[in-house]
């Protein structure tokens, strides 16, 4: 939580940026950040499963199960949603 001084200072900085460059706010909203493709991350999770089981024993098997579930979720969610 920001203090009132910090919040006021932040608002002053933002106001100064918007006065200096009016397109700043538009660029911040209009340009979404790049996220990794979901199927690639899903494949990496699936590839990590044998190593997790081999090196982690029971705990590794649990982590591999979690990686499998999350990998499936990412795979079926596709690349169009962010």
Image (cartoon, rainbow, N blue to C red):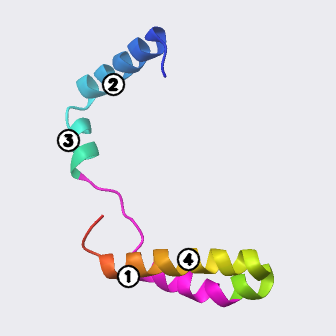
The 10 Å Cα crowd at callout 3, few under 14, some 14 to 19, many 20 or more, is: few
Residue 29 horizontal side relative to residue 38, left or right: left
Magenta-drawn segment: 31-50
Which tag, 3 or 4, sits closer to the chain's start? 3
Residue under circle 4?
67
Q: Position of residue 33 (x, y in %)?
A: 35, 57
76 vs 17: above or below: below
Q: Indicate the secondary structure of the residue bearing disc 4.
A: helix
Q: CA distance from mark 4 to mark 1?
A: 12 Å
Q: Nearer the viewer, residue 49 or 30?
A: 49
Q: Nearer the viewer, residue 34 or 54?
A: 54
User: Residue at point 24% right, 73% down?
Assistant: 80
Which tag, 4 or 2, sits closer to the chain's start? 2
12 vs 40: above or below: above
Which tag is nearer the camera, tag 3 or tag 4?
A: 4
Q: Indicate the secondary structure of the residue bearing disc 3.
A: helix
Residue under circle 3?
26
Based on the picture, tell me whether residue 46 belongs to the magenta stretch.
yes
Q: Position of residue 61 (x, y in %)?
A: 68, 81
Tell whether label 4 touches label 3 (CB within 8 Å).
Answer: no
Residue under circle 2?
14
User: Residue at point 32% right, 21% down?
Assistant: 16
């Amino acid at each position: 939580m920001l203090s009132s001084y910090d919040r006021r200072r932040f608002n002053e900085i933002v106001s100064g940026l918007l006065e200096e460059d009016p397109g700043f706010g538009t660029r911040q909203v209009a340009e979404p950040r790049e996220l990794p493709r979901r199927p690639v991350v899903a494949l990496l999770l699936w590839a990590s499963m044998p190593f997790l089981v081999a090196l982690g024993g029971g705990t590794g098997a649990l982590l591999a199960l979690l990686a499998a579930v999350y990998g499936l979720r990412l795979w079926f969610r596709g690349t169009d949603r962010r």
